[in-house]
Amino acid sequence: MDGKDKKNRVRNWFGNLTPMKSFLFGIVFAILIVIIVGAIIVKVKNSGYGHEITDTKKNGERPELQVDLIEPNEYSRPQIKLKKVNGIVIHYTANPGSTAKQNRDYFNGLQYSKKTKASAHFIIGLDGEIVQCIPCKEIAYASNKRNYDTISIECCIPDDTGKFNDKTRKSLIELTTWLMGRYDLSIDDVIRHYDVTGKLCPKYYVEHEDAWKKLKDDMLDYIDKKGSKAD
Ligand SMILES: [Zn+2]
């Protein structure tokens, strides 16, 4: 069969396109486009990003906090005003087995050791305890260029994998969703230190993108379940 035969066969199969047939083909094509676009929109909405829940609900319930502020000093609490909160940055301590209190004391001790400039607004311990080290109206030294417009949360870890245990993870969800409501932030404003500088922090959630997405999905679910209507 040469090329010409092939062409003729195709033409015969379609027949001669009458205006009516062209019109029907057009309708079928338009319906297909609507179905495909609709499916894409539904997929994006369900993906967790562009989730509608946070637009209508907020978690207004403040989790239990232990306020144990770092003493004002230039290495960990410079008392620079945090004017506007545009995001929440999640970190891990990179120090397996250490407690929230130990990490808080480490930050506080930098004024004497002068080793580096570091701190965080909140540290979540292995028992799920939340220690606040810096008032939310001041910056912390945690997230490099985003220190000036974000709140930082450090999470303690039980081992080298850097994965948060269930208690730490639960408190993180409670604290982050409460802060989202307080500062009118969306789930896209919740980021990792990695997203600012490319640093491997929080380690497990950089190495496991699926775990990071699941964590954020669980935050949205928590708002959906616990949240009340936003004003
Ligand atoms: Zn970090």
Image (cartoon, helix red, strand yellow):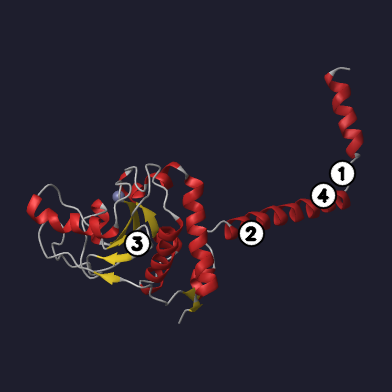
**Residue highlighted by disc 4:** 25
First reached walking from the N terminus: tag 4 or tag 2: 4
First reached walking from the N terminus: tag 1 or tag 4: 1
Type of amino acid under label 2 = Val
User: In the drawing, does residue 185 fall left or right of residue 118?
Assistant: right
Q: Report how far apart the C-alphas of labels 2 and 3 lie in the structure.
A: 26 Å
Looking at the rendering, in which quadrant would you find the N terminus?
Answer: top right
**Residue highlighted by disc 3:** 87
Looking at the rendering, in which quadrant would you find the C terminus?
Answer: bottom left
**Residue highlighted by disc 1:** 17
Q: Is mark 3 within 8 Å of ligand 1?
A: no
Specify few, some or many for label 2: CA neighbours under 10 Å numbering under 14, 14-19, or 20 or more. few
Specify few, some or many for label 4: CA neighbours under 10 Å numbering under 14, 14-19, or 20 or more. few
Secondary structure of the residue carrying numbered label 1: loop
Looking at the image, the residue that sits furthest to the bottom is: 231
Residue displayed at 13% across by 62% down: 78
The x and y percentages for residue 180 are: 40, 68
Whether label 3 touches label 1, CB < 8 Å: no
Type of amino acid under label 3 = Gly
